[in-house]
Image (spheres, rainbow, N blue to C red):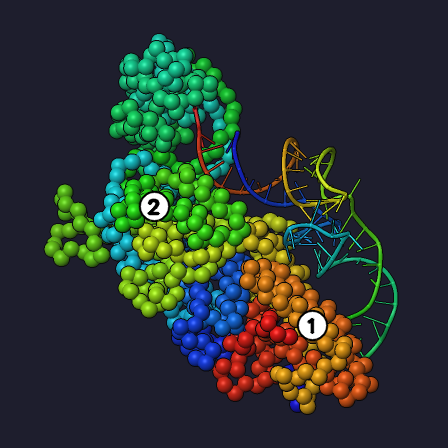
Amino acid sequence: MINDKFLKPYNPHDTEERIYKLWEESGFFNPDNLPTERYTLNAKRFSIVMPPPNVTGVLHMGHALMLTLEDIMIRYKRMCGFTTLWLPGTDHAAIATQAKVEKDIYKTEKKSRHDLGREEFLKRVKAFAQQSHDTITSQVRVMGASCDWSREAYTLDEKRSLAVRTMFKMMYDDGLIYRGHRIVNWDPKGQTTISDDEIVYEERKAKLYTFRYSKDFPIPIATTRPETKLGDVGVAVHPDGKWKSYIGQTLEVTNFAGVPLSIRIVGDTDVDPEFGTGAVGLTPTHSFTDWEIAERHKLNKELVVINEYAKMTDKAGPLVGLKVTEAREKVVEWLNSSGLLEKEEEITQNISTAERTGGIVEPLPKLQWFIDVNKPIKAREGKTLKDLMREAVKSGDIKILPDHFEKIYFHWIENLRDWCISRQIWYGHRIPVWYKGEELFTGTEAPKEVGWEQDPDTLDTWFSSGLWSFSTLGWPEKTKDLELYHPTDVLETGYEILFFWIARMVLMTKYALGTVPFHTVYLHGTVRDGQGRKMSKSLGNGIDPIDVAKKFGTDAGRMALIVGNTPGTDMNISEDKIRGYKNFANKLWNIARFVLENTTEETLEEDFSNYTEIDTKLREERHVIFVDVTKDMEAYRFYMAAEKLYHYAWHTFADKILEESKAILENGSAMEKKSRRQLLIHSLDKILRSLHPFIPFVTEEIWQLWKQPTTLDGMLMVAEWPATDSL
RNA sequence: GCGCGGUUAGCUCAGUUGGUAGAGCACCUCAUUUACACUGAGGGGGUCGCAGGUUCGAGCCCUGCACCGCGCACCA
């Protein structure tokens, strides 16, 4: 007797939450609980550690795509008999979360974090993060993610904190982490340092001024930032250029916009003799390249004229206290009135802005913590961190999909400088270093004696993210999980965090464990709206995956995200596309209804072989599809597998085979009827299995209504993927 | 400046080793209660960015160019 439910259209709303609960209660998300007959701990294993969503808000379409792709891989492998672990978690996202809470507090209470104090402020951030965490994890469930919640991790929880402190200590002892007074990227808006990768370049119109420091100064200089020239200590020229006769001289400028300057002329091959005036005014404290040149020629690197608030210091004489933009105008005015300005040109230049705050980055010398990427490591055969990152991909231990990202990855490593890891924010892993006068202590715990003061700074959030593949599995403890599931199989994430995250995970893992963190990197593109625009609040063109689930069902949203989505390429999604796959879920529902209504007396006979000629041919055609689809699954061509299955179920099975079956079941001989019923019932069985990784809810619901399993291991979730070695 | 990717139907995109151009959506015609109207049958529509080359044969391989997007560097 067919279930009455089939008489109505499929209703994802009434189904999905119930089915997810059923799966979760089965315990099968946890690899330790998988049925032992099929899955044993010595069998083949497959693991993915989920890229942790930031606890800054809600799930967006990019998360939905990530969760769908990973769930497809996990469900597919689980059905293939692998003991699968998909480990979920969330990210404290230091700067992002702190900035969000600071903004909220300022909006409602007009208070800054300093008004509240460190302790109270952190309490507020924690509360926000907790709430955000709860929202996000419930939304991950809505997406149908079959991840093991019993192993859930947070980048800032107790275990991950220990991993961070342990790693810091290890790297410090190996001389890979050092404290240095160096020029860094300072974000005046966020009041913190940021790494090179957190800079976003913006093209802007600017003016290039050509001037002389004084009437009798022999060499003209060009600059876009006249206000920094108050900090100049030298001029660099090419050793073979037209100014070479001045090399070695020190020229005194008695008054430059109110301050005296002492300018030494140095020869350096970094200077392009053909560009500008062929000479560079050197401001070591406010320019990266000038700092390096100053270092080579032992020039003064103490003259700081701009402070942390992007205002002029008292070294700027009469300009003290002015914002850099105001000071720029004043200096230009002074140059003009003194007859020193020779040229003014419009140019376009890239200015550096901070990714999170949008503030204009001010290069400043500061005492900060760094990771040395060029230091030979004894325990790793004298290789540097750069070497380790390079070799992981070059050797083929890690495959990046699509493979052209491998080139981008190598290119990034070539240009990599030491990584500044200290941040002047409060939310995050506090640097595990304590000071007492001149003494310094670093360790996983604070020193016992009194009088030690911990470094006030926190670590770049990507430091803890870099440990994610193994800190989640219990490192530094030698756990069973680490032994069984690391290196993980696949890391699936958006290409925009290739450097931020993927490269850092490779760095940390190769250094600490000597292995790669994962073998395959699957990079997905950005999800855009129907017209290819980025989804944004200001455009109001965003599609919320939770709304999609409510309106069309999660299955429809998942299918729409997968079909036509190739790795590394951005994809557009519209409600029209999602609607199409909602219809598909209903189609499948009615396919099941038709097959089950016409085979009420029939059971699925595993070894039935008495097929008619036509049905034999249909079985063979069906087999070709599943062999093909399985190949696609193995090659990560999910977009193709999904489309083929969709097409087979709807346009081959439903439109052709079911239609033809009506006549056979009406007028055929007993043998023809029997053969056809077996064909239908076997086809439905295989279609449900093969579509389950893509649209898990509707397939499981049909399976449950049809098979009514009495034990948990009768669930479709742990059923076998259609065999490819037999029809 | 160096590098990477893209350019295929009105729109969004596939096209796995070179062998007669595909899907979804949209559009047009027909069917009108059928397992399913969240439906079915059929149809129109593309000199595959441009110009050369290799080949019996090129959307696919090679060279050059154009436009769009992206990464990195420079940014005196």
Q: Are marks 1 and 2 in contact (CB under 8 Å)?
A: no
For image coordinates 73% across by 70% down, the residue present is: A652
Name the residue beneath numbered marker 2: A385
The residue pinned by badge 1 equals A620
Marks 1 and 2, how far apart in space? Answer: 53 Å
Residue A660 shows in this picture: yes
Q: Quadrant of the C terminus of chain A?
A: bottom right
In the picture, measured across the screen, residue A687 lies left or right of residue A59, that is: right
Image x and y of residue A189, in percent: 38, 42
* Relative side of A273 to A624, left or right: left
Count of numbered badges drawn on the protein: 2
What amino acid type should be assigned to the residue bearing mark 1?
Glu
> Which quadrant of the structure image shows residue B43?
bottom right
The quadrant holding residue A320 is top left
Q: Position of residue A279 (x, y in %)?
A: 40, 18
Residue kind at label 2, given as amino acid type? Leu
Disc 1 residue crowd, few under 14, some 14–19, many 20+, Cα 10 Å: few
Mark 1 or 2, which is nearer the eye?
A: 1
Badge 2: few (under 14), some or many (20 or more) residues near its Cα, within 10 Å?
many
